[in-house]
Amino acid sequence: MQHYTCDHVHLRSRDAVAAATFYVQTFGAREVKRVGDGAVQRVVLDLGGLTVFIEQAPAGTAPAGPTPCLGIEHIGLRVADIEAAMADLEARGVPVRTGITERGPGLRIAFVEGPDGALIEILERGSV
């Protein structure tokens, strides 16, 4: 069988630059480059080792469907202290979809909303 590795996650946005700024300011992503002659067509980020492409969506692109849904539903970001992370996100006005819940031994999660309705899971894994 062929060996596969993750290369990137590709998001579309009505404003790729504003969406990239959100991920940089909110989660400490690092902007790697911008693609496009004149108008930005894509912003490439490094989000904790994950390459994220944020593409400028053409007018008329349909928004993502409501969750739960089929296909890629959310991005999960791990933190060491979920209470501190959620307090920080709430203080900065990031919309919270669900507060902190226990999902089993050693797993606590919460969900926030990013640009264009992107669902972002914040999770803390403890020792089991």
Image: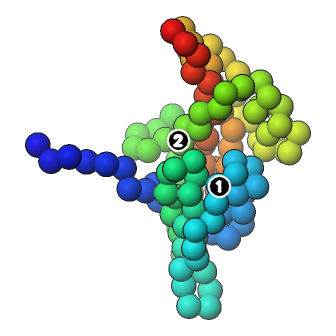
Identify the residue shown where x is 76% and y is 55%. Answer: 25
Q: Reading the chain from its start, which is encountered first: label 2 or label 1?
A: 1
Tag 2 and tag 1, C-beta contact below 8 Å: no
Crowding at dot 1, Cα within 10 Å, few <14 / some 14-19 / many 20+, comes out as many
Asked if 54 appears above or below 49 in the picture, the reply is below
Question: At label 2, which amino acid type do we have?
Answer: His
Identify the residue shown where x is 56% and y is 57%. Answer: 46
The x, y position of residue 55, in whole percent, is 53, 69
Crowding at dot 2, Cα within 10 Å, few <14 / some 14-19 / many 20+, comes out as some
**Cα distance in 3D space between marks 2 and 1:** 17 Å
Q: In the depicted view, which residue is nearer to us: 60 or 47?
A: 47
Helix, strand or loop status at disc 2: loop
Is residue 74 found left or right of 21 in the rendered image? left
Q: In the depicted view, which residue is nearer to us: 14 or 121?
A: 121
From where the camera sits, is residue 124 visible? yes
Q: Which residue is mark 2?
A: 74
Residue 108: mark = none
Residue extending farthest to the right is: 91
Q: Which residue is mark 1?
A: 29
Asked if 117 appears above or below 31 in the picture, the reply is above
The x, y position of residue 120, in whole percent, is 61, 41
The x, y position of residue 9, in whole percent, is 46, 54
Residue 24 position by quadrant: bottom right
The x, y position of residue 10, in whole percent, is 47, 59
Helix, strand or loop status at disc 1: loop
Identify the residue shown where x is 54% and y is 85%. Answer: 36
Quarter holding the N terminus is top left
Question: At label 1, which amino acid type do we have?
Answer: Ala
Identify the residue shown where x is 60% and y is 42%. Answer: 119
Q: Nearer the viewer, mark 2 or mark 1?
A: 1
From where the camera sits, is residue 19 visible? no
Asked if 59 appears above or below 107 in the picture, the reply is below
